[in-house]
């Protein structure tokens, strides 16, 4: 088993403005049929956060798997079965769903030096970003990148591709 298989799952969040350093620890909960339902917080300080990750499903595409991701979530310890707590087990390839490729993914000497996603500073992944709509019938090539004329100072670029349409179409979010 390779080192990358042990990388923690990184939830990619995009902040539309700089997030405040003070974060409230209060938990907001609503109820539905007598069960608590957590309310997702989307505003931190002066910034709004958009979760751009796709929902994991058994049939979602996964690298080198013909039939999709398959079963990826188990509950090995359950309070219903006498355990003191519920404990989930999640096992999936690192190239499943929305993910970040680290410098060590394609350059072996960087991998050997420890440049994995768990060493990425979250400041790299959070903050204002430029959203680029990629034509649905084209690939992102060097020529396309050069034609974008990305303004100086832009630190993050997101590419909306055909895959975005396939997996975000039922979400009620707007990334632009």
Image: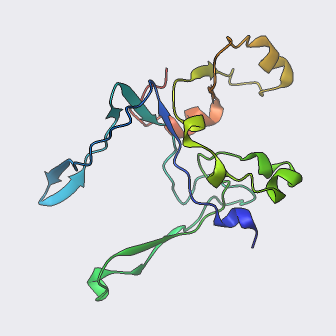
x, y percentage for residue 132? 63, 20
Q: Which quarter shows the N terminus?
A: bottom right
Which residue is more in the foreground, 130 or 143?
A: 130
Is residue 104 rendered to the left or right of residue 9? right
Looking at the picture, how far across and down is residue 152, in whole percent?
A: 68, 12
Residue 122, quarter of the rendered image = top right
Q: Is residue 107 above or below residue 165?
A: below
With respect to residue 7, does 165 lie above or below? above
**What's the residue at 29%, 83% (across, down)?**
84
Q: Residue furthest bottom?
A: 82
Looking at the picture, tell me which residue is in the foreground, 106 or 138: 106
Task: Specify the quadrant of the image occupied by residue 58.
Answer: bottom right
What is the x, y in percent for residue 161? 64, 29
**Residue at horizontal 44%, vertical 25%?**
174
Left or right of residue 163: residue 50: left
Residue at 71%, 60% (x, y): give it.
65
From what the image shows, is residue 78 above or below residue 26? below
């Amino acid at each position: 088993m390779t080192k990358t298989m042990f990388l923690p799952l990184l939830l990619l969040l995009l902040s539309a403005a700089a997030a405040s350093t003070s974060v409230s620890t209060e938990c907001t909960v609503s109820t539905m049929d007598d069960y608590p339902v957590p309310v997702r917080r989307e505003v931190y300080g002066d910034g709004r956060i958009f979760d751009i990750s796709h929902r994991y499903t058994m049939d979602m595409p996964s690298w080198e798997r013909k039939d999709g991701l398959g079963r990826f979530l188990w509950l090995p310890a359950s309070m219903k079965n006498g355990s003191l707590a519920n404990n989930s087990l999640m096992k999936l390839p690192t190239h499943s769903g929305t993910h970040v490729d680290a410098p060590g993914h394609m350059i072996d000497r960087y991998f050997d030096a420890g440049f994995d996603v768990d060493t990425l500073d979250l400041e790299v992944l959070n903050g204002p970003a430029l959203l680029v709509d990629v034509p649905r019938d084209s690939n992102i090539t060097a020529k396309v990148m050069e034609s974008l004329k990305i303004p100086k100072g832009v630190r993050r670029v997101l590419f909306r591709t055909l895959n975005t349409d396939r997996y975000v179409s039922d979400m009620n979010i707007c990334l632009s």
